[in-house]
Amino acid sequence: MKERLIALLESLDAHVTSHSRRTLMAHLQGTHDLLEAWGNPPAICLAGLFHSIYGTYAFDKRSADMSMRDTIRDHIGTRAEALVYAFCVTDRRCFYEHLGESRFVLRDIVHDCDLSLEGKSLSALIEIEVANVVDQVPYRSQKKAVRAAETYAPAFARSRDYISAAAADAAESCFRSVLSKTEHLNEAL
């Protein structure tokens, strides 16, 4: 099955699209693999494999047009595609305002409308975001890695009760590593 999904991503040029000092394909696979290693259900892992395929507020390269939603859904399933869509069309910085809510509304910034979701979708979206960030940080410049650590560490810490322990631990370890490198660099100067 994964070969079929990789073939679809290749047909969308993910293997030649630049992302975080490597290819989008490498990033998508890395995100998927983290989610899988953390014990997430298949739908969340598949959403991770396609999480930015429609582009996002932070990654404006659209490998798949919104008109391809049915095709993507046919390949990864309804739940996974719904998560991908929500991940792509919302400003993920707003996720953390809705912790603990059983239902919540996010703004679809692409289509300028509201997107109503259940709390379990928020947990899945944050889990995907953690994998997204943890996968990218090692490939970022030290300056961008530090900025990511400073930005996401507090949000992920507040989300600890809503994500897997493995995701929370991975984020904490990733950010600790980045910040300790910075401390060592500062001490050397």
Image (cartoon, rainbow, N blue to C red):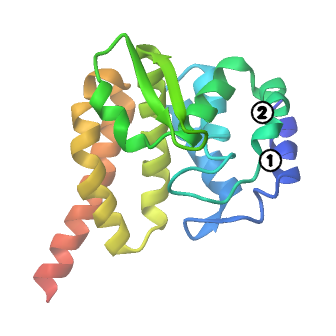
Earlier in the chain: of badge 2 and badge 1, it is 1
Q: What kind of element bears circle 2?
A: helix
Q: Nearer the viewer, residue 11 or 137?
A: 11
Around disc 2, counting alpha carbons within 10 Å, would you say few (fewer than 14), some (14 to 19), or many (20 or more)?
some
Q: Is residue 62 above or below residue 140?
A: above
| x and y, in percent, of residue 171 in the image | 33, 44
Percent of width and height locating residue 142: 34, 73
Q: Which mark is residue 9?
A: 1
**CB of mark 2 within 8 Å of CB of mark 1?**
no
Disc 2 marks a residue whose amino acid type is: Arg
Would you name the residue on which mark 2 appears?
Answer: 69
For residue 137, side relative to residue 188 (left or right): right
Indicate the quadrant containing the N terminus: top left, top right, bottom left or bottom right: top right
Q: CA distance from mark 2 to mark 1?
A: 13 Å
- Residue furthest front in the image: 112
**Dot 1 crowding, Cα within 10 Å, few <14, some 14–19, many 20+:** many
Q: How far across and down, in percent of the image, does residue 66 sit?
A: 75, 40
Q: Which mark is residue 48?
A: none
Q: Is residue 132 above or below residue 118?
A: below
Identity of the residue drawn at 79% across and 33% down: 72
Q: Secondary structure at mark 1?
A: helix
